[in-house]
Structures are given as structure tokens and as C-alpha cells.
Amino acid sequence: MRTRTVVLALAFLLIGAIAGSMIGPPPAGATSRDMIQLQSQVAQLIQGQQDMRSALDTQGATLRTLVQQSLDGVNTLNTQMGSLQKAVQEVQANTGSRIDTMTTQTQGVSDNLQDVQARVAKMAQQLSDMQGLLQSIDAKVSGGASPAGAPATGTPLPNGAANPAAPGSSQNNAMPGATPNPASSNAPGMAPISADTLYQNALRDFTGGNYDLSRQEFSDYIQHFPDNDLAGNAQFYLGELDYAQGNFKGAISGYNSVLQNYPHSFKLAASLLKRAYAELELGMKSTAIRDLREVERRFPGSDESRRAQARLHELGASSSSRPAH
């Protein structure tokens, strides 16, 4: 038992010595070198951290500058795009207005040409009638000439009978070649103004912007000359007057009157086209597209057909000549 206790005591002493040697402070030289090395590593870490922070700050500043430049570029581009879009809209508006003005002027010129053609036809008819009248007068003069040896004009005949050719004779009240009284040839109930003059006045007032007077004159033309070739034109311009004044429903009614009541009018294609324009103004897009396609189908190759095709393209709709995709 005693031996065992001694052995245990020696074992504890040995273990304490070993632990003391391990826990005990190292030599002073080794400690100094470790501290210096540790301080150097800490300094390097601090310097690396500072360098990294400086690099990050530099890169962040550069990135912020680039982002700001990009934002400035985007803002500038947006401003330029807005200006460009506004310019395009103004050009489109001005172009549309100019096209409408040119269309109105072209219609006026076309109507003037039609009116001139009608006048030429009337003048030709009047010339033919005048030639027939002159031939009739010549025939009467030739048939009523005094035979050879007859007494001269104004010479009294035997027994005091008056010469039938004498100026005071009742048979010679109208001298050959005398101009007949125009009033005697006027048909009763005619308007106090000619169709040509009334139409020209109405068209001039329309192009001059005197809409109220032009409306009255075109209405008078239809009332007094309903069978004239230009009656359909007058009805078309009544629709145009409503369109110009923003009364698109009234304009559609006027164009419908041309299409229904004047099947041989010069303005059928224009009436159908302008009806489609008025329907677009009222938001009737599907109906307007149908009318625009009808213009292309019924009047191929005309100016109205080309304008209808252009408007269909603006609306993103296919024309009647090609199927929709």
C-alpha cells in the first residue's frame, strides 16, 4: 500500500513537471520574434484593407459617373425623341391639312372643268339651233322675194292697194334677220339666275370659306335644277360643308344622298371616301374600313382609291386587293 502511494506521488510529480514546462512562458527571444511577425501581418492586413477600400471607392465613383452619364444620355435622348415626335406630328398635321386643301382645290378645278364642258355643249347646241333658225329665215326670205317687174317697196299698187312689202304693212311687222326678243323665248317658271352662274357662285363661296351663302346656293341649285348633271356635285358639296364645320353626322347624310340619288354623279367615289373619313371622326372604325375597301373595289386606279389605300395603311388594316395576314 505504501509502495503504491509512493508510485502515485512520483507520477503526479512527473506530470506536474511536464505540464509546468509546457505552460511556462517561452524564451524572451522567441516571443519578440512572434510579436514582430504578428504586427507585420496585421499591418499588411490593414494596408490591404485600405487599398481595397480605396479601389472600391474609386470604382464606385467611376460607376456613379458612368450611371449619371447614362441617365443624362437617356434624358437627352428622351427629349430629342419627344421633339422629333412633336415635329412628326406637326408635319403630319400640316401635310393632312395641305392635302385636304389641295383636294378641295382639285375638286373645284374638276368641277370647273365639268362646268366648262357643259357650257361648251350648251353653246354647241345653241349654235346648232341658231344655224337652223338662220336657214329657216333664209328660206322664208327666198320664198317671199318679189318677182321681176314687180313694183318697188313702198310703191302703191293699182286701185290704191298697199304693197305687202311696204314698211307699214301688217305682213312685214318682223323684218328678215331681225333679232327676236329673248324674253319671248324664256320658259315660264324658270329661276331668275342660270344654272351655270348659280353653281359657279356656290363653288366660289365654298372655296372662299363663305359657307352659309354657299350652302344656300347649292340648295337652290338642287331645288331649281334637280336634273342637271351637276346636281350630284351640289349635293356632295352640301356634305362637304357639314364636314368642314364638324357636323360629321350631317356630312354622312349628305354623302349618302349622293350615293343613293345620283348614281351617275361625278362624285360617287369622293362621296364614299369622305363618308369613310367622317365615320373615322365619329369613331366608327370598322364601318370606315369597310367603306375604304369599297372605294378600292369600285373605283380601282382612281385618286380616291389611292387615298383609301393610304388611309387603310395608316389604320393598320389590309386593303381589299390583298388578304389580311
Image: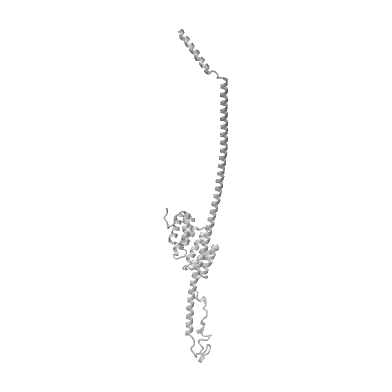
Q: Residue at x 48, y 74 (%)?
A: 124
Residue 66 visible somewhere in the drawing: yes
Q: Nearer the viewer, residue 39 or 102?
A: 39
The coloring applied to the image is one colour
Q: Nearer the viewer, residue 83 or 233?
A: 83
Q: Nearer the viewer, residue 135 or 91?
A: 91
Residue at the bottom extreme, as displayed: 159
Whether 281 is drawn above or below 119: the answer is above
Whether 250 is drawn above or below 162: the answer is above
Whether 224 is drawn above or below 249: the answer is below
Q: Residue at x 57, y 34 (%)?
A: 51
Residue 187 visible somewhere in the drawing: no
Residue 208, picture quadrant: bottom right
Q: Nearer the viewer, residue 36 or 160?
A: 36
- Give percent across and percent down for residue 307: 48, 59
Residue at the top extreme, as displayed: 2
Q: Residue at x 49, y 11 (%)?
A: 10
- Give percent across and percent down for residue 182: 52, 76
- Give percent across and percent down for residue 238: 50, 62
Whether 246 is drawn above or below 59: the answer is below
- Give percent across and percent down for residue 260: 44, 63
Q: How many marks?
A: 0
For the N terminus, the image quarter is top left
